[in-house]
Image: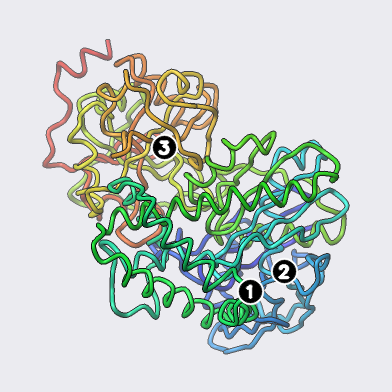
Amino acid sequence: MRICGIKLTHDGAVAVVEDGRLLFCTEQEKRDNSPRYQSVENLDAVVLALAEHGLDPRDIDQFVIDGWDGEIESQFQVLSGAVPIGLKGAPYVERANEGLLDSVDGFGLILGGKTFPYKSYPHVTGHVASAYCTSPFASAGNPAFCLVWDGSIFPRLYYVEPRGARLIASLFPIIGHAYAAAGLHFGPYKQPNRASWDLGIAGKLMAYVALGAVDESIVAVFQELYEKRFAADTEQARRYRADIHNAESSLAAIHEFFEASAWRLTDKRAEDVLASFHVFLERLLVKEMAMVLLRHSSLPGARNLCIAGGCGLNIKWNSALRATGLFDDVWVPPFPNDSGSAIGAACSAMAAQDGFGPLEWTVYSGPSLQDSELPSDWEAAPCSLRELAVILAGNKPIIFLSGRAELGPRALGGRSILAAPTSPAMKDHLNNIKRREHFRPVAPICLEDRAPEIFSPGTPDPYMLFDHQTRTEWRDKVPAVVHLDGSARLQTISRNSAHKIAALLVEFEQLTGIPLLCNTSANLHGRGFFPDAAAACQWGRVEHVWCDGLLWTKTAVQKPSSAERLLLA
């Protein structure tokens, strides 16, 4: 059975699952240098994604649309070719504790001039399904808790087992957007117009808080205002909690919370305020999670946890939950945010039919590299991974494009800018290339078996979703990947992986003794990954582009010296 999941709104994507196996997921931002978080505005994008994999809409047995804003159902206005159409979908959250798999059924999905029926499941259902079905717990047939904390909802904890899933608790009354909203009131992204913001602010703040220090007097202010405005049995708090389905009203209450905080914190540094708010939320999350688990201690099975929703990209909170000892194992998929919602929609349909079972998948299931012509001021020549390692060892960054793109927002070696980590200036150089703020970290990609030697804990982290500390004796050896607080957003990869990035790391290790490289995403500022080598060349801010065996080099750039080539002998 072929199921096509579609995410129409921000982080739009199309995914196809066939008999429990993910064939592909095409995120719109990863097509044609599209803007980050690009939505599916025209259903022709669905037809195109299917065609690229040899499929016609008539080859799909079931279409599924991810739910969106709405208490009873959601509404979508899209184009099909030049024809505007309206579609209905499921709401953001389920309408009953055990209603995750209650669907809204529709007709009128026009694809390639033909009309198809479809189903729609709540938005949170997709998060639960994508997180659990891709987890090792599903593969083993074991139950798991699933935390979903998304922008417009309070953190919700579910209990998932193969036969079904149900809501256990809403942990505390703060919507996920609160973290990014803090950045509109304090720090470098402060702005008077708070009607909308860059969806990437939350990730930038996670880096910025390393500049600050936790101040318990600031934490106390946040705690007091939280109780008064959100959690206590006051009229103001009750009204806020009752209005959770009104995203605009909930966000307005969050902004009022920060305005009241700002009046109390005028003498505090912005970086300390944001660091303290980060820790306030982290402590609240850990405390409430522990209390809920205690109340539900009779639930059978190992204490496994899946994390999904936009807040699942917060590596420090993920690590804090893992460090509590409350759970035997913690799983975060590489797409905990809405970039995984098309996959989640398809998995929801699988679960409705056969229960919550495992999905066969790989993270490198995004778009293939497109054919592209060599720009006139570039030349291309065969280049082995050994030769590429020599260029990197010479402290020159390269764009590395290989195979199909990775799923989710992190560059994981398929669409990466790589560089040697040994120069302290390299981090600033890469941030300048990317036109990013100076405080932004550059991630390390490291051979898995050597990661514990360099990082703490250094446990396997293939999707860059947990926090690791760089061990003291290594900080001067790999300064470019060490963040301001000594941490690193580590990605690990097995040296036996079939992906070419693993073989390159082995070559670099043999040359230098260093088993890791700097790794940041290869993309235009504010855009998705480069779709082909020509796009990387046209960007022109890195002099070498390696694309599946060919090295594309600016003709004005001097080729590797004879001394460098002697290293290959």
Is mark 1 in CB contact (under 8 Å) with mark 2?
no
Per the image, the residue denoted by label 3 is: 548
Q: Earlier in the sequence, mark 1 or mark 3?
A: 1
Give the residue type at disc 3.
Answer: Asp
Per the image, the residue denoted by label 1 is: 233
Q: For residue 324, which quarter of the picture?
A: top right
Regarding residue 274, the answer to whether it shows in the image is yes
Per the image, the residue denoted by label 2 is: 64
Looking at the image, which is closer to me, 262 or 177? 262
On the rendered image, what quadrant is the N terminus found in? bottom right
Q: Secondary structure at mark 3?
A: loop
Q: Earlier in the sequence, mark 1 or mark 2?
A: 2
Residue 221: percent from the left, percent from the top? 41, 62
Disc 3: CA contacts within 10 A as few (<14), some (14-19) or many (>=20): some
On the rendered image, what quadrant is the C terminus found in? top left
Query: Depth-wise, is mark 1 or mark 3 nearer the camera?
Result: 1
